[in-house]
Amino acid sequence: MNSQVLPNVSGVAIDGRALLIEGAPGSGKSSLALALIDRGASLIGDDAVTISERSGQIIAEPPPNTAGMIEIRNVGIVELPTVEAQVALVLSLDPAAARFPLELGQRVLLGTTIPLLTFAPGDAVQALRAEYALAQHGLPFPNRTSSATREHDG
């Protein structure tokens, strides 16, 4: 299995899809991840994420050295449960991010192209904006049926 550790990347899972947050040290990756966890996301990894290719999908999972640990500024290291999920979107924290992105960028991870969105860090509604970014620009689940469809079929 082909795998790689991505440094300076935090990851959370929202509704089963991985949102990777990349940026320079101190750019707010952990703060955004924590805000998303507060809104119901699950931790994958903080400041490092392991990715692997499985059946044509890129899966994000906790890094071996720091699995379950997240840094909370002015508090310290806190342990949280972790999950793994299929990567759907990369947010690249950049104070110069365009207010209205005209096109998505791309990040190639283990040979698979993933949508990339530059993202202004640090405002009060950052977690809400990240959820909308994933819904609007993230890769969809392949062949996923909704729970409502499964209920009617069964």
Image: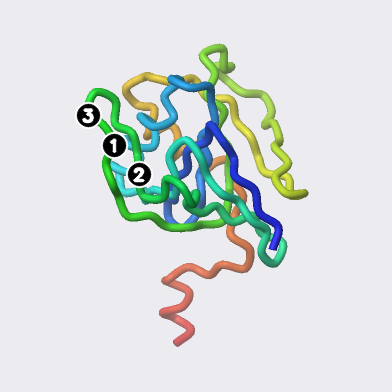
Residue, disc 1: 77
Evaluate if marks 2 and 1 touch, with contact meaning CB atoms under 8 Å apart. yes
Task: Report how far apart the C-alphas of labels 3 and 1 lie in the structure.
Answer: 7 Å
Crowd rating for badge 3 (residues with CA inside 10 Å; few <14, some 14–19, many 20+):
few
Residues at circles 3 and 1 in contact by the CB criterion of under 8 Å: no
Q: Mark 1: which secondary structure?
A: strand
- Residue at 49 percent across and 20 percent down: it is 120
At x 39%, y 32%, the residue is: 30
**Which residue corresponds to mark 3?**
75
Q: Is residue 142 left or right of residue 84?
A: right
Q: CA distance from mark 2 to mark 1?
A: 6 Å
> The residue under label 1 is which amino acid type?
Ile
Q: To which residue does mark 2 refer?
A: 69
Task: Please tell me which residue lies in front, 10 or 106.
Answer: 10
| Quadrant for the N terminus in the image | bottom right
> Tag 3, which secondary structure?
loop
Relative vertical location of residue 18 with respect to residue 84 in this rendering, above or below: above
Give the quarter of the image for residue 28.
top left
Q: Estimate how packed mark 2 is, as few (under 14), some (14 to 19) or many (20 or more) residues with alpha carbons within 10 Å.
A: many
Q: Which mark is residue 110?
A: none
* Colour option used: rainbow
On screen, residue 57 above or below 31: below
Relative image position of residue 136 (x, y in whole percent):
55, 41
For this rendering, which residue is in front, 83 or 67?
67
In primary-sequence order, the first of circles 3 and 2 is 2
Give, as a three-letter code, the residue at label 2.
Met
Q: Quadrant of the C terminus?
A: bottom left
Please tell me which of labels 2 and 1 falls first in the chain. Answer: 2
Farthest residue to the left: give it: 75
Taking 37 as reference, is 130 left or right? right
Residue drawn at 24 percent across, 23 percent down: 74
- Asked if 59 appears above or below 151 in the picture, the reply is above
